Image (tube, rainbow, N blue to C red):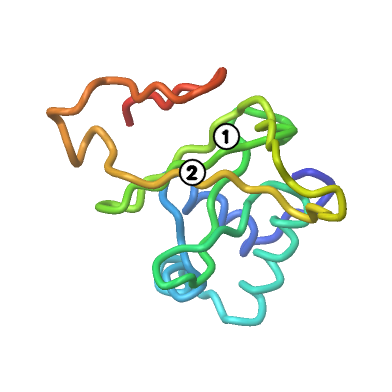
Amino acid sequence: MNGLSTTRMRVAVLETFYSTGKAYSMSGLLKQVDGSNRITLYRTLKSFVEKKILAEVSGKNNYPVYVLQCPKDSVSSFDYVAFFICRECGKTLSLQTDKPNVKGLPGNVSIEEEKLILSGTCGDCTPARNANISLRGNMKIPRI
């Protein structure tokens, strides 16, 4: 598990993410994972973020939510990942993409963290939409 020891809590958290494909807040995971407590869950999430298994992104009202950063069958995370979060049902996609080329920043700016977060409505919540949403660059969001 990316250099982490296997514990019941870590397995339960990963199973929750893999089985639902959704983003979760800390309180959402506390309700979802049986036998969890806030401290152990916080440490588990922190470890998964450090190992790039999960990513912490801003959710509704800027509260942090956690999303899978690497697919279930992947052995390692990607160099650059974009996240799509459905505003209706909470489903998420982690998408491997080329690193965006940001132009126009002054020379004295230091970027410490980069996350591309896309939000909208997934194909299940809006069946009339096109099967794929094309984005600029080498990235496509498949219908989920």
For the image shown, how many numbered marks are present on the structure?
Answer: 2
Q: Is residue 36 above or below residue 8?
A: below
SS under mark 2: helix
- Identify which amino acid the numbered label 2 is placed on: Tyr
Q: Nearer the viewer, residue 95 or 13?
A: 95
- Identify which amino acid the numbered label 1 is placed on: Lys
Specify the label residue 72 is tagged with: 1
Whole-percent x, y for residue 67 in the image: 53, 51
Label 2–label 1 contact, CB within 8 A? yes
At x 62% / y 53%, what residue is drawn? 55
At x 65% / y 74%, what residue is drawn? 42
Whole-percent x, y for residue 119 in the image: 39, 47
Asked if residue 20 can be seen in this view, the reply is: no
**Dot 1, how many residues are within 10 Å of its Cα: few (below 14), some (14-19), or many (20+)?**
some
If the image is split into quadrants, where does the N terminus sit?
A: top right
Whole-percent x, y for residue 125 in the image: 19, 41
If the image is split into quadrants, where does the C terminus sit?
A: top left
> Splitting the image into 4 quarters, where does residue 43 fall?
bottom right
Disc 2 and disc 1: Cα gap in Å?
A: 7 Å
SS under mark 1: loop
Whole-percent x, y for residue 21 in the image: 42, 44
